[in-house]
Image: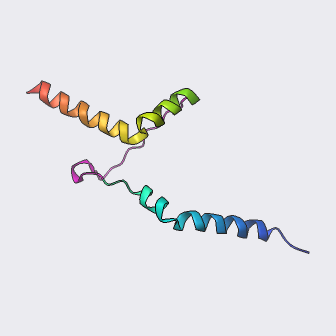
């Protein structure tokens, strides 16, 4: 009689396969300029309806937000001069 261990082993094998996939490993770390790296990271989250989430993804997700924030900071610096 088999125990439920087979299901766990199968799941563990799938997880291991996903974690060792070279494409996923490259996607995990997004290089950023050293000027943007901070010692304290802040997580931002929002609850979105599916249409808003689809637009978020279409715009580029977090990469789009970082670029938008970078441009906004630069604009504020120029206005304050």
Quarter of the image for the C terminus: give it: top left
Answer with left or right where residue 33 lies relative to residue 80: right
Image location of residue 8, percent across then percent down: 73, 66
Of all residues shown, which one is farthest toward the bottom? 1
Answer with left or right where residue 30 lies relative to residue 9: left
> Relative to residue 34, is residue 2 depicted above or below?
below
Coloring applied to the structure = rainbow
> Relative to residue 58, is residue 17 depicted above or below?
below
> Relative to residue 44, is residue 50 depicted above or below?
above
Q: Which contiguous range is marked in magenta?
A: 32-48
Image location of residue 53, percent across then percent down: 52, 32
Looking at the rendered structure, the number of numbered marks drawn on it comes to 0
State yes or no: residue 3 in magenta. no
State yes or no: residue 42 in magenta. yes
Q: Which residue sits at x=47%, y=60%?
A: 23
Answer with left or right where residue 70 lies relative to residue 20: left
Of all residues shown, which one is farthest toward the left? 81
Image location of residue 59, percent across then percent down: 41, 34
Quarter of the image for the N terminus: give it: bottom right
- Classified by dominant secondary structure, the portion drawn in magenta counts as loop
């Amino acid at each position: 009689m088999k125990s439920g261990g087979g299901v766990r082993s199968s799941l563990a094998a799938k997880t291991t396969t996903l974690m060792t996939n070279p494409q996923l490993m490259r996607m995990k770390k997004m290089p950023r300029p050293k000027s943007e790296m901070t010692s304290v990271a802040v997580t931002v989250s929002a609850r979105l309806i599916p249409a808003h989430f689809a637009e978020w993804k279409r715009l580029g997700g977090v990469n789009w937000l970082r670029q938008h924030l970078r441009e906004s900071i630069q604009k504020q610096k120029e206005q304050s001069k």
